[in-house]
Image (tube, rainbow, N blue to C red):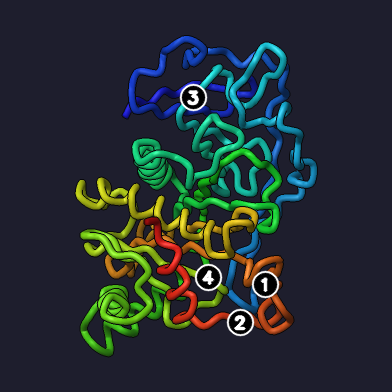
């Protein structure tokens, strides 16, 4: 992997990741951002909810962020003579830059945008295995670098795909958040893992994976990864992808797991696009890497895993969070995990 670090006109960091030397025609990594940008002014604030003991980021400056721009004004496409985007180069493979409208900033963390491809009309599922491996390498590099920053407690790599999810930029991309606190979902998992260890003397994540691999909800199994619909899935179609060898975060994946990941993950995404039939629009989804906190008690008990789920419950129908879910956090699933696993096996690539 070749990594090139540069700066945008307002001082934000921009990083190119390439499989090979990318200094080819139209793709020079030393291209200068010519835009007359003012320095980014963001004032995110972290507040603690005293009733739940959970942190909330207040980022009112995000109200003015870019919203559904036309394709010829996409800020994530390569720059041209007619349009100067966030990517000064005329082409790129994978690019990462600091978000101009971050939810977290300064001492309160950092937000980055990860562009998976220069092709505005592509999707992650349409990437080849070499590019998917490069994205994995970029996620890993960002996890390592951001984890080493003072004040960062947890690194979260994720992709939101589809307007139904709330995506405001159509270009295929994801994000990386460096949180100054441990997120609520992770804190709950750590408490469950600690209780399981005290009760059984075993690791909770390893026990769950072993039970799921022996059951009926396995969707896709490789030599180093297993994808399964969890027993108590919250979303209509929800899959957890976990490496067989437990590691706390992406930096701990071994070479064999890294080599197998692209084929497994791409197949999983392609199956998601086939769930609702050949005439259905692309399936909206959230793909979320769950990683251990950077430091602290319980890190050694955590297991890296990816959670992939969609808010679409049937063709033309979305799952909206009802009063029980939005108000109380008590989920009600309309699709049984077993039937969801059946369907995801049915739509396997031939």
Circles 2 and 4: CB atoms closer than 8 Å: no
The one of 232 and 297 positioned closer to us in this rendering = 232
Looking at the picture, does residue 12 appear above or below residue 254?
A: above
Q: Which mark is residue 92?
A: 3
Q: Which mark is residue 334?
A: 2
User: How many other residues sit within 10 Å of disc 1, few (<14), some (14-19) or many (≥20)?
Assistant: some
Looking at the picture, does residue 222 appear above or below residue 329?
A: above
Residue 180, image x, y percentages: 51, 54
Q: Which mark is residue 319?
A: 1
Query: To which quarter of the image does residue 291 belong?
Result: bottom left
Secondary element under disc 4, as helix, strand or loop, is strand
Query: To which quarter of the image does residue 43 belong?
Result: top right
Secondary element under disc 1, as helix, strand or loop, is loop
The one of 116 and 215 positioned closer to us in this rendering = 215
Relative placement, left or right, of 298 versus 114 is left
Q: Which of the two discs, 3 and 4, labels the residue nearer the N terminus?
A: 3
């Amino acid at each position: 992997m070749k990594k090139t670090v540069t700066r945008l006109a307002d001082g934000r960091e921009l990083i190119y990741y390439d499989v090979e030397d990318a200094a080819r025609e139209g793709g020079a990594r030393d291209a200068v951002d010519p835009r007359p940008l003012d320095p980014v002014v963001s004032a995110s604030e972290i507040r603690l909810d005293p009733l739940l003991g959970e942190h909330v980021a207040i980022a009112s400056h995000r109200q003015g962020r870019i919203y559904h721009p036309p394709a010829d004004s996409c800020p994530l496409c390569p720059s041209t003579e007619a349009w100067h985007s966030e990517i000064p180069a005329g082409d790129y493979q994978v690019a990462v830059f600091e978000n101009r409208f971050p939810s977290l900033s300064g001492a309160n963390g950092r937000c980055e945008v990860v562009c998976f491809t220069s092709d505005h009309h592509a999707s992650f599922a349409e990437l080849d295995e070499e590019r998917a491996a490069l994205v994995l390498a970029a996620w890993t590099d960002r996890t390592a670098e951001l984890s080493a920053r003072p004040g960062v407690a947890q690194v979260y790599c994720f992709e939101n795909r589809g307007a139904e999810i709330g995506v405001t930029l159509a270009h295929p991309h994801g994000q990386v958040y460096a949180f100054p606190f441990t997120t609520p979902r992770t804190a709950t998992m750590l408490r469950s893992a600690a209780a399981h260890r005290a009760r059984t003397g075993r690791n909770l994540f390893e026990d769950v994976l072993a039970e799921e691999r022996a059951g009926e909800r396995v969707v896709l199994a490789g030599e180093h990864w297993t994808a399964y619909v969890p027993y108590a899935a919250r979303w209509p179609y929800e899959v957890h992808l976990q490496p067989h060898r437990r590691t706390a975060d992406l930096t701990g994946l071994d070479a064999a797991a890294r080599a197998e990941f692209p084929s497994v993950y791409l197949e999983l995404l392609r199956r998601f696009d086939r769930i609702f039939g050949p005439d259905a629009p692309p399936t909206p989804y959230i793909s979320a890497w769950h990683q251990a906190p950077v430091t602290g008690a319980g890190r050694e008990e955590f297991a890296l895993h990816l959670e992939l789920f969609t808010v679409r419950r049937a063709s033309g129908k979305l799952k909206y969070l009802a009063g029980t879910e939005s108000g109380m956090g008590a989920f009600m699933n309309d699709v049984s995990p077993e039937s969801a696993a059946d369907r995801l096996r049915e739509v396997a690539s031939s």
